[in-house]
Amino acid sequence: MIVPLLLVAVVAGAALQSATGFGFSLLSAPILFAVVDPKPAIGLLALLGMEVNLLTLLTEGRRPRPLAREAAVLVGCALPGALAGVVVLRSLDAVALQVLLSIGVVLTLGVRHRLATRTAVVPVLHDGPRPRPVWSAPVAGFLSGALSTSTSTSGPPLLLHLLGRGARPSVVRDTLTVCFAGLGLITPMALLVTRTTEAIPDQGLAGALVPAVVVGHLGGRRVFARLAHGPHYELVVTIVLLISVATGLVSVLA
């Protein structure tokens, strides 16, 4: 029964990330944590997440247009955060990590709502995003790195920062994907440096889930083609966050 449940989680998570630019770990991590120990779950999510990102960057027949300088700052600041996240992973049990994940997503929703209220009158720029405080990108990068190696859900800080920049959905999606690809390299490096060998996922399970990522990505790609040119992008993003909170809390209470 474990493999079918994981297949559903991975397909849904890959589709959401393909459609919105993030959401793979936010949706699939709570379920994976419920059926797999946290440490190998982190390793498995890092592997599958990298697959999602490579599919987005290399197989869509278009040239990605990320905010390159922004992505470099975010990924660079994620390096020390990833090491801090390993300390959290080793210190907390599975239930505590689930609670931490849910709290982080709820806080993200609250801050995002406040940000949206404050900037509602400012139009989205064509390709030149609004400036943010100088500390915003370093803090978002550090937190995303810490979350990447502790709960595997590095998306909320990055998303919050990038949406505050007012970039188009396609630019946000591409920048998130580049950042996630960078984090996909940083996470195993941090686990290796800290000798967290328990994070190595089961090869048979990983092999069974790799095709599920492809299926989810192909489905989500069509959804994004509509979202990017419509008014509902941020609504879908908020719904994804709410789903991840509900899934995480259910798994904790179960």
Image (spheres, rainbow, N blue to C red):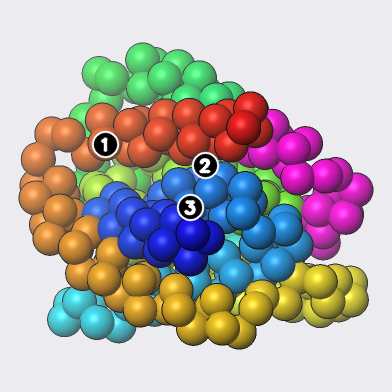
Q: Residue at x 26, y 36 (%)?
A: 236
Q: Is residue 80 rendered magenta in the image?
A: yes
For the residues bearing labels 1 and 3, Cβ distance under 8 angstroms: no
**Relative side of 97 to 103, left or right:** right
Give the residue at mark 2: 156
Measured as percent of width and height from the top left, residue 70 is found at: 49, 58
Tell me residue 112's x, y (percent). Answer: 45, 26
Q: Name the residue under label 1.
A: 236
**Residue 167 versus residue 97: which sits nearer the camera?**
97
Q: Indicate the position of residue 108 as horizontal and vertical percent values.
A: 53, 30
Q: Which amino acid does label 1 sit on?
A: Val
The stretch drawn in magenta includes residue 208? no
Q: In the image, is residue 7 above or below residue 245? A: below
Name the amino acid, label 2.
Pro
Q: Nearer the viewer, residue 170 or 47?
A: 47
Sequence-first tag of 1 and 2: 2
Q: In which quarter of the image is residue 239?
A: top left
Q: Give the range drawn in magenta.
A: 77-102
Q: Which residue is drawn at 42% across and 62% down?
A: 4
Residue at the (35%, 31%) spot, across then down: 238
Q: In this view, does 172 lie to the left or right of 27?
A: left
Q: How crowded is mark 2: few (under 14 residues within 10 Å), some or many (20 or more)?
A: many
Q: Quadrant of the C terminus?
A: top right
From the image, tell me which residue sits under label 3: 28
Q: Taking 241 as reference, is 97 left or right?
A: right
